[in-house]
Amino acid sequence: MGTLARACEAFGSYLALSPGCADPFGPKALRASTGSVFRVPLGDFSPDGAVALVARGAPPLAELDPSLSRFVLGSERDGLPEDVVSACAASATIPLAGPAESLNVAMAGTIALYDWRRSRG
């Protein structure tokens, strides 16, 4: 959570947390955020108009319409629930070249934010 807060600050984004997600103010998250959690705006979670990041079975992130600027990430173990994926405007995956099965949430979120920022010039 803390690393993702740092990425949000670096790329000028905000963080929206769903019920039951990791605590952004827990000791490990605070340490990893290096204070970003206090500077990044917190928003209300909603999958409406967002992109569901999934491990596989969706178009590559780079092919998305750049106007879709919100990303929904699930837990590292279970991913996103199907009802959340269905409620999102689109789904995307980050293609992996190596044998790794997936990326952790902070890495995936950082790559998505970087790709979105890059696509907007």
Image (cartoon, grey):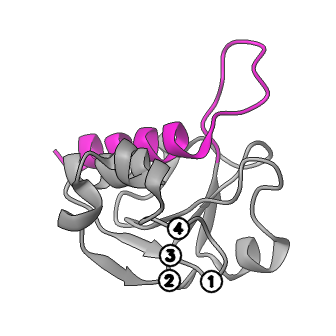
In the drawing, does residue 37 fall left or right of residue 21?
A: left
- Residue 69 drawn at (x, y percent): 37, 65
Amino acid carrying label 2: it is Phe
Frontmost of labels 1 and 2 is 1
Cα gap from disc 1 to disc 2, whole angstroms: 9 Å
- The residue drawn where x is 64% and y is 30% is 95
Q: Observer-nearest residue: 28 or 14?
A: 28
Whether label 2 touches label 3, CB < 8 Å: yes
Q: Is residue 39 among what the camera can see?
A: yes
Cα gap from disc 2 to disc 3, whole angstroms: 5 Å
Frontmost of labels 2 and 4 is 4
Frontmost of labels 3 and 4 is 4
- Residue 118 drawn at (x, y percent): 26, 40
Packing grade of label 1 (10 A; few <14, some 14-19, many >=20) is: few
In the drawing, does residue 7 fall left or right of residue 78?
A: left
Whether label 1 touches label 3, CB < 8 Å: no
Packing grade of label 3 (10 A; few <14, some 14-19, many >=20) is: some
- The residue drawn where x is 75% and y is 64% is 80
Amino acid carrying label 3: it is Leu
Question: Against 33, is 99 above or below?
Answer: above
Read off the residue under disc 3: 17
Read off the residue under disc 4: 23
Q: Is residue 116 among what the camera can see?
A: no
Read off the residue under disc 1: 19
Range covered by the magenta-colored residues: 93-121
